[in-house]
Amino acid sequence: MRPKPLAPGERGRAPGEVRVPHYASGRYAVVKGGAPARRGRGAVVRYLVEVERGLPFDPAEFAAEVHRTLNDVRGWARFQRVDDGPVQVRVALSSPRLTSRQCLPLRTGGELSCWNGRRSVINALRWAEGVPQYGGDLTAYRRYLIGHEVGHGLGHHHRPCPGPGRLAPVMTQQSKSLGRCRPNPWPYPHRKPEEGR
């Protein structure tokens, strides 16, 4: 079964529409919190969003997209965005150079994102351009990036493609390769809205 197509209004900018500098300020600004978790059962994960100063993205728009992704019922859990106090995860949009620094000793080649033990470091170049495996669907790829790196923050590890033609687990390294799987941005892609309540 193929994943449902996105509604027309859900598509983000076309890949490559924003020019991302190799480096920006090297300093993060925390985006204002106050975004509640979606309704439902289960624990609420407190998180915050940081954006490197000098990147060509609106921090509030980035934070809103992260929040929509994390609180979708096909996602990991229920998430509350705050701007201070204890948090389980920090989601940080970073220039390629800052990503490389934050992700050491992992070598990102200026392209990959990572979990560094306290931050989901999202490479702004990938955020802007996506990868060929997602066929130009930048919104779906961005959801994968958030789900994958936050998944590490929740204790999940990499998983291989389970078989030809199947949906790739969100913890597959889809930015590198799908194997013989199909792209999938969600931890629980078959969950229906009523199941998440």
Image (tube, rainbow, N blue to C red):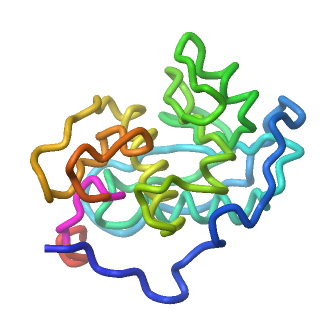
Of residues 36 and 184, which is closer to you in this image? 184
The residue shown at (24%, 48%) is: 169
State yes or no: residue 185 in magenta: yes
The residue shown at (83%, 48%) is: 55
> Would you place residue 176 above or below residue 130 in this image?
above
Q: Is residue 22 left or right of residue 83?
A: right
State yes or no: residue 158 in magenta: no
Residue 89 position in % (x across, y down)? 51, 36
| Rendered image quadrant of residue 6 | bottom left
| Rendered image quadrant of residue 105 | top right
Q: Is residue 51 left or right of residue 46?
A: right
Residue 16 position in % (x across, y down)? 69, 61
Quadrant for the C terminus in the image: bottom left
Of residues 67 and 110, which is closer to you in this image? 110
The residue shown at (76%, 56%) is: 59
> Would you place residue 89 above or below residue 165 in this image?
above
Of residues 128 and 38, which is closer to you in this image? 128
Q: Is residue 37 left or right of residue 91?
A: left
Secondary structure, magenta segment, majority class:
loop
Give the extent of the magenta segment.
184-191
Residue 106 position in % (x across, y down)? 52, 16
> Would you place residue 196 above or below residue 154 in this image?
below
Judged from this view, the residue extending furthest toward the bottom is 8
Quadrant for the N terminus in the image: bottom left
